[in-house]
Amino acid sequence: MTHPAPQPATGGPRHLGGFATGLALVLTAVLVGTAAQRITTTNPTPVSAAGVTATGHTTTVAVTADGMRFHPDHITVPAGDRLVIDLTNRDHRRHDLVLATGATTGSIGPGAGTSLDAGIIGSTVDGWCSLPGHRQAGMTLTITTTGSPDTPGEHSTGHTTGDAPAVAPSLDAMATPAAGFTARDAAAPATPTARVHRLDLHVQEVQREIAPGVTQQLWTFNGTAPGPVLRGRVGDTFEITLINDGSLDHGIDFHAGALAPDQPMRPINPGERLIYRFTATAAGIWMYHCSTMPMLHHIGNGMYGAVIIDPPGLPAVDHEYVLVQSEFYLGADGRSGDLAKMQTERPDAVVFNGYVNQYAHRPLTAALGDRIRIWVLNAGPNRASAFHVVGAHFDTVYREGQWQLRPDDPGAAQVLDLAPAGGGFVETVLSEPGHYPFVSHIMVDAERGARGLITVH
């Protein structure tokens, strides 16, 4: 790694750095910082932009990016020193370092490194990784001067990039979509006869309307949130090729498969691809989602979908629908979701199949006396689901791989309760014509958009 060439020294190098330890978010890791070295040079720069007299010294600090943290994440240098940061990326994904003064390393791939000239340090300066969500997930760094208090209001503000605060659009869950609005087709795909299923899943960053007049940039599989519904039987093999057509690193995790995550769930960079192969050994409706940290941000921004593995002997029904419940945490119009809202569990909308109240405006349909099966997956990332059809009893309940109620049983159920990532199905026969609302019976979420209608003719 190359450092700026020092001028003739007037004194020997002095060690100013040390070791720092802390706890990483999600994965426990020891944070080890390397020693900083201060070099005295001749012909000091007279005055820095911060209004402090330059000392003519250069302090060089080695910093590593690993486990979604900078190590060390706090650097102290004498006021007036020039700071050079030697940044090495030991993580398995890309990172950068941006300072509030405007200095930046640019994107650094796994195993790579670079030097950042931070300039003359005269006050506290904040730094962060500017990749979406990394700063809010805790990937920050603070530079202070000897004797300077690290208190709010004294940090350098300067130039800012990434994760900048922005005003989210207003969302009216009761608004009516435009006349040409088309709801997502909720019909379940037929079970394929083949026993090996191959599919290309493209990571795509797209602009999508998620409520009347509200557009967000979603991170998706094949352009939709939720992604495509896959289906098969116990014993079937799935061979999924993940192709990253986006601008960020992404990965994928299929709950329907049981295998070590190390290789198939690793994040891949833009332009890369990987093959994820698994055999379905158990029945149920299973979630798949992006496996890249922070997963909260990637799932909350649209990267999820469902895989149905039929229970053996599953009978045919007249209508079979799939509803995936999820949440939206609005960023500015046309931008990605707000990770801070996700972290504090403040959803702006809770929806079925990616759009607020879409089936209230474009109802699901059935004929009088039809048997209806509704598969429900709760993709979260945070809210529970309490699926209920107003005016109906469920005579069949299948939840998380277990039959809990069958038509011959004397009782009936009123709700299918699902934690995030949970799934199952219910069946009912609606015996009168009319309009039957379905909701999450967590009422605040129903009013946020988790509702629709079944129209029976």
Image (spheres, grey):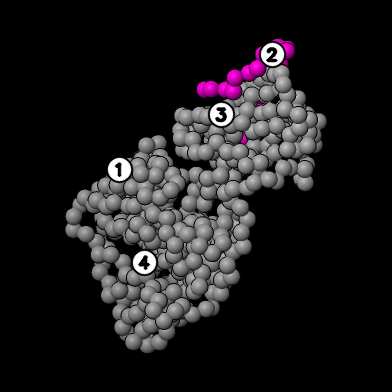
Instruction: Tell me which residue sits at (64%, 24%) in the image.
Output: 60
Determine whether the residue tagged by mark 2 lies in a helix, strand or loop: loop
- Whether residue 22 appears in magenta in the rendering, the answer is yes
Q: Amino acid at mark 2?
A: Ala
Q: Of discs 3 and 4, which sits in the foreground?
A: 3
Mark 3 burial class by Cα count in 10 Å: few <14, some 14-19, many 20+: many
Q: What residue is shown with label 4?
A: 322
Mark 4 burial class by Cα count in 10 Å: few <14, some 14-19, many 20+: many
Rendered position, 266 above or below 411? above
Mark 1–mark 4 Cα distance, whole angstroms, equals: 26 Å
Q: Of discs 1 and 4, which sits in the foreground?
A: 1
Q: Of discs 2 and 4, which sits in the foreground?
A: 2
Marks counted in the figure total: 4
Q: Amino acid at mark 4?
A: Val
Q: Amino acid at mark 1?
A: Ile
Rendered position, 413 above or below 311? below
Q: Amino acid at mark 3?
A: Ser
N-terminal label among 3 and 1? 3
N-terminal label among 1 and 2? 2
N-terminal label among 3 and 4? 3
Instruction: Tell me which residue sits at (72%, 42%) in the image.
Output: 156
Near-viewer residue (2 or 397): 2
Q: Are marks 2 and 4 in contact (CB under 8 Å)?
A: no
Q: What residue is shown with label 3?
A: 115
Q: What residue is shown with label 1?
A: 275
Q: Which mark is residue 100?
A: none
N-terminal label among 1 and 4? 1
Q: Which mark is residue 9?
A: 2
N-terminal label among 2 and 4? 2
